[in-house]
Image (cartoon, rainbow, N blue to C red):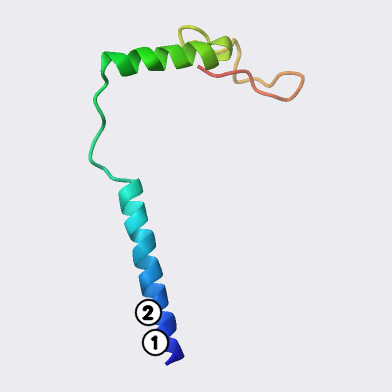
Amino acid sequence: MNRAIIGATMLLGGSAVAGLLWVRFDQSGPTEASAERLDRGRAIYAANCASCHGAKLEGQPDWKSRLPSGRLPAPP
């Protein structure tokens, strides 16, 4: 009887996880790239990314070589 309970619990748990993953990773396709979303993305990039990665996505010079601190410069 214990095996049956354990098996049923594992089956239900696995089904629940599979259902959650199905919902989370739904492959229904890309969303529309509306002008509003594009403008919002540009504003987010300008505010949070452009200072290191460049206003035109160029990255920092020699970005494949480590700095004296050991860190890598921002890539394009």
- Can you say whether 20 is above or below 48 in the image? below
Can residue 49 be seen here? The reply is no
Where is residue 9 drawn, in percent x and y? 41, 76
* Residue at the (54%, 16%) spot, across then down: 48
- The picture quadrant where one finds residue 52 is top right
Where is residue 36 drawn, in percent x and y? 30, 15
- Can you say whether 55 is above or below 75 in the image? above
Amino acid type at circle 2 is Ala
* Residue ID for mark 2: 8
* Residue at the (47%, 15%) spot, across then down: 45
What label does residue 61 carry, if any?
none
Measure how far apart labels 2 and 1 are at the Cα level. 6 Å
Can residue 46 be seen here? The reply is yes
What label does residue 4 carry, if any?
1
Q: Residues within 10 Å of mark 1 (few under 14, many from 20)?
A: few
- Can you say whether 50 is above or below 9 in the image? above
* Residue at the (23%, 40%) spot, across then down: 28
**Residue at the outermost right position:** 68
- Element on which disc 1 rests: helix
